Image: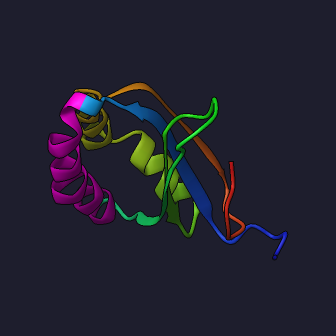
Amino acid sequence: MNDEPIGMKLLLSYELNPESSQEYYQFVMGSYVPTMQALGLQMSEAWHTAYGDAPNRLIGFVTEDQESMLSLLDNETWLKLNEQLEEFVSEFSYKVIPYRGGFQL
């Protein structure tokens, strides 16, 4: 694995509300992911945690440079997307890290 950053990664973590799973999937696949792509990020991974203390969802998006990431985080569309996402999830959080490929926490 390469130790040099090859871009920036945005990691979203949250708990999916089981009673809204169908609406969640429709929103994420129909709106959230396409909008993030339009804002210049690509989905890199989606993980489900079945057991343990970790959030049951971890979603990653990547971009080639820090400027694109900073632009996203300052974008009103990003804020509105997450407000909509929070209708279906709890304990939502995110962090930005250097992207090095592979699984990252």
Residue at position x 49%, y 39% in the image:
56
Residue nearer the viewer, 10 or 65: 10
Task: Find out whether residue 74 is within the magenta segment.
Answer: no
Residue 84: x %, y % from top left: 21, 33
Residue 46: x %, y % from top left: 46, 58
Q: Is residue 88 visible?
A: no
Residue at position x 32%, y 65% in the image:
37
Q: Is residue 92 visible?
A: yes
Task: Find out whether residue 24 is within the magenta segment.
Answer: yes
Tell me if 76 is positioned left or right of 98 in this view.
Answer: left
Residue 27: x %, y % from top left: 18, 48
Tell me if 41 is positioned left or right of 20 in this view.
Answer: right
Magenta region, residue range? 19-38
Where 1 sits versus 80, above or below?
below
State which quarter of the image contains the N terminus: bottom right
Q: Quadrant of residue 77?
A: top left
Where 87 sits versus 70, above or below?
above
Residue at position x 54%, y 34% in the image:
55
Query: Most extreme residue toward the right, as rendered?
Result: 3
